[in-house]
Amino acid sequence: MKLPQFEDIVNAHERIKGYVHHTPVFTSSAINRLLGSELFFKCENFQKTGAFKFRGACNAVFSLTDEQAIHGVGTHSSGNHAAALAHAASIRGIESQIVMPSNSPEIKKKAVASYGGIITFCEPTLEARELTLQRIALQTGVEIIHPYNNFNVIAGQGSAAKELLEAFPDLELVLCPVGGGGLLSGTALSVKSLSAKCRVIAGEPSGADDAMRSFKAGYIIPSVHPKTIADGLLTSLGELNYAIICRHVDNIITVSEESIIEAMRMIWERMKIIIEPSAAVPVAVLLENKELFQNLRIGIILSGGNLDLKNLPF
Amino acid sequence: MKLPQFEDIVNAHERIKGYVHHTPVFTSSAINRLLGSELFFKCENFQKTGAFKFRGACNAVFSLTDEQAIHGVGTHSSGNHAAALAHAASIRGIESQIVMPSNSPEIKKKAVASYGGIITFCEPTLEARELTLQRIALQTGVEIIHPYNNFNVIAGQGSAAKELLEAFPDLELVLCPVGGGGLLSGTALSVKSLSAKCRVIAGEPSGADDAMRSFKAGYIIPSVHPKTIADGLLTSLGELNYAIICRHVDNIITVSEESIIEAMRMIWERMKIIIEPSAAVPVAVLLENKELFQNLRIGIILSGGNLDLKNLPF
């Protein structure tokens, strides 16, 4: 199992930088006052396709040789990876085959279609998703790009934290959410390579706490019947991701649904930016543990801003 | 009646620039494609207190002599000017007396209180608001700062368009909303002084179309029973504002409530930023008149981002 190194993130960043946004870092004096620390928000909600996922998808697509790319790429996803992969493929001028569960939100289906993804619907089970994708891959010869358990995807995701640390080298802590571990593993690789003293902590919904339990147990515990509003964080950790997380992450802290919603509302109201529930999870870590994080310079990766405006939790 | 000139905007900008945010200009390739023009959004929703109003309030407060300022400032407002004035006063270290109608939204009352404004509630009529403020002014000696019909407020508001034109000197059109005319008059002064060829057009809700009718009639027609979701645009034009608007504005175009909501949703969904309905009005002008605005470089002032998340129109 070959793990990506920081050098791979540097190469990924070079490869994708003409395609991705170098997203801005926002600050809020009001939130700093409320939480007692100095916060630097890396706004991946402003990334193309509305989430950091575009970095990894882009790196995976543009890492393919022409021969590998000729039949296009494919994945199964109900979320941000699907739109990101479809968009990256369209930029390279290749096809993307996206398997989506039939109960995916309309807004996600529309997004994938608008980027030119070829959608195949299936039953909303992991088994049906994987079988459908395998069948399509056999028929079409697409390269399958896993949403997080993929060397090039991890290297691409790490470019967000790289930009953040390059702009603010004296951060003492970087927080991000953890679902499958793509963002967290890339972030940890970047942070630990660019700063000797900066800690990396992930936030996870307590209703989907498999990453925290895996981190403590020493082996991957699959996510079973997770339940959380943070719909980007329902998946189990990948093996590549887990290996990097064990090596480089300082802690994983779980938070309640109430705190996630409160954190999300705080960001919307105070910063006037739209983040999805998953992106609010690391902010919820600060809300629930104010005393642990006083007077620190903290970077937070706001992972995305895609959600259904008709179905808000406030 | 002494009207502000561009020189006054230059002086205002110098005076307030240590206190206000130099707000960013956002672009969206998706919205450009949808509307067929190249748009540059001046994000005053990210301004302190969540709206451009802080520029004018700040300039008015810091233009006072120490003698004038000693008893504080006062205004009546149910909206963004109240919070802006309270915050500007607190920065200068003087009191602010804010008269608010008793039916003001909780969120606005809280905002004013959080900035240290001293609130007096009154019946929700213009008469009660003016009488209450006059009584307080007699008792306390506060300087009354009108939300828009005020020389220094207009000069402050003009600094937003000044920043926009300085960053993008080749804009062909600048759009902003019109309510009392503070933003529009300041914007028109800046634009027409900085660019010979750039037009200025205002958007106005058709349910509150007094500015458009005044513009066409040649005299101020008061706003009577206006009805629109754009709650920042309910007021009648001020005399100073009207004189400048007649001289420098190219057109005022009205839009439907449906278009305002559609424009607001488009900005939220595509740009992941929160704007209030009033800020969506100039975008609605483009939605309703696509054929008039093709292939232009257009600046849009997104005036604010304050609204009740519990009461959204989608």
Image (tube, coloured by chain):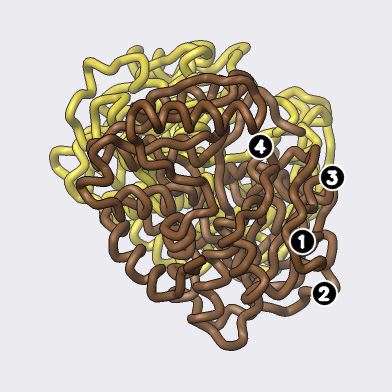
Chain colours: A yellow, B brown
Q: Residue at x 39, y 70 (%)?
A: B8
How many tags in the picture? Answer: 4
Residue A291 is left or right of residue A129, and the answer is left
- Element type at mark 3: helix
Q: Residue at x 48, y 64 (%)?
A: B158
**How far separated are the C-alphas under marks 2 and 1?**
23 Å
Say which chain tag 2 marks. B
* Residue furthest bottom in the image: B196
**Looking at the picture, which amino acid does disc 1 mark?**
Ser
Residue B244 is left or right of residue A140, and the answer is left
- Pointer 3 and pointer 1: residues touching (CB < 8 Å)? no
| Labels 2 and 1: the sequence-earlier one | 1
Q: Residue at x 23, y 42 (%)?
A: A192
Name the mark nearer the viewer: 2 or 1.
Answer: 1
Name the mark nearer the viewer: 2 or 4.
Answer: 2
Q: Could you say which is closer to the camera, residue A275 or residue B129?
A: B129
Q: Label 1: how many residues lie within 10 Å, few (<14), some (14-19) or many (20+)?
A: some
Q: Label 3: how many residues lie within 10 Å, few (<14), some (14-19) or many (20+)?
A: few
Q: Is residue B85 visible in the rendered structure shown here?
A: yes
Labels 3 and 4 positioned on one and the same chain: no
Labels 3 and 1 positioned on one and the same chain: yes
Residue A72 is left or right of residue B150, and the answer is right
Q: Position of residue B80 (x, y in %)?
A: 52, 39
Please name the residue that numbered disc 3 is placed on: B258
**How far separated are the C-alphas under marks 1 and 4?**
50 Å
**Looking at the picture, which amino acid does disc 4 mark?**
Gly
Please name the residue that numbered disc 4 is placed on: A79
**Looking at the picture, which amino acid does disc 3 mark?**
Glu
Q: Could you say which is closer to the camera, residue B163 or residue B124?
A: B124
Please name the residue that numbered disc 1 is placed on: B214
Q: Residue at x 70, y 33 (%)?
A: A309
**Looking at the picture, which amino acid does disc 2 mark?**
Leu
